[in-house]
Amino acid sequence: MEIGKGVIIVGFFLIFMGILIYTFGDKVGFLGNLFGDFKYESKGIKIFFPITSMLIISIISSILINLIIKIFK
C-alpha cells in the first residue's frame, strides 16, 4: 500500500511540474544560461552541461516533494 501511495504522490508532482513548465516555460529562459552552465561549440561539436540549472531545479523539486509528502502523510 505504501508503494502505491508513493507512486500517486510522484504522479501528482509530475503533473504539477508539467503544468508549471507548460504555463511558465517561456518566463524561465534564464535556466541554461546561468553562471556555471558549461557550453562549448566548435565546427561539428556542441557540448552543454547545465550544472547550475540542474542544481537549482533539484533543490526546488526536493523542497516541493518534501512539502507534498509532509502534507499527505
Image (cartoon, grey):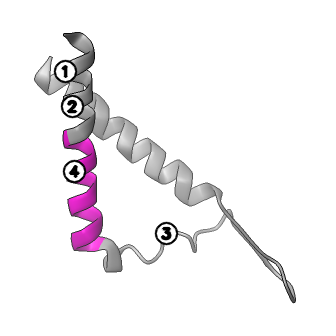
Whole-angstrom CA distance, mark 4 to mark 1, is: 15 Å
Residue at 33 percent of width and 80 percent of height: 26
Q: Nearer the viewer, mark 3 or mark 2?
A: 2
Do the CB atoms of the residues marked 4 and 3 lie less than 8 Å apart?
no
Residue on which the image places disc 4: 15
Q: Going from the N terminus, do you reach mark 2 or mark 4 first?
A: 2
Do the CB atoms of the residues marked 2 and 1 lie less than 8 Å apart?
yes
Residue on which the image places disc 3: 31
Residue at 21 percent of width and 20 percent of height: 4
Image quarter hosting the C terminus: top left
Q: Nearer the viewer, residue 67 or 16?
A: 16
Q: Nearer the viewer, mark 4 or mark 3?
A: 4
Left or right placement of residue 39 versus residue 44 in this view: left
Tag on residue 24? Answer: none
Residue at 24 percent of width and 39 percent of height: 11
Whole-angstrom CA distance, mark 4 to mark 3, is: 20 Å
Q: Amino acid at mark 1?
A: Lys
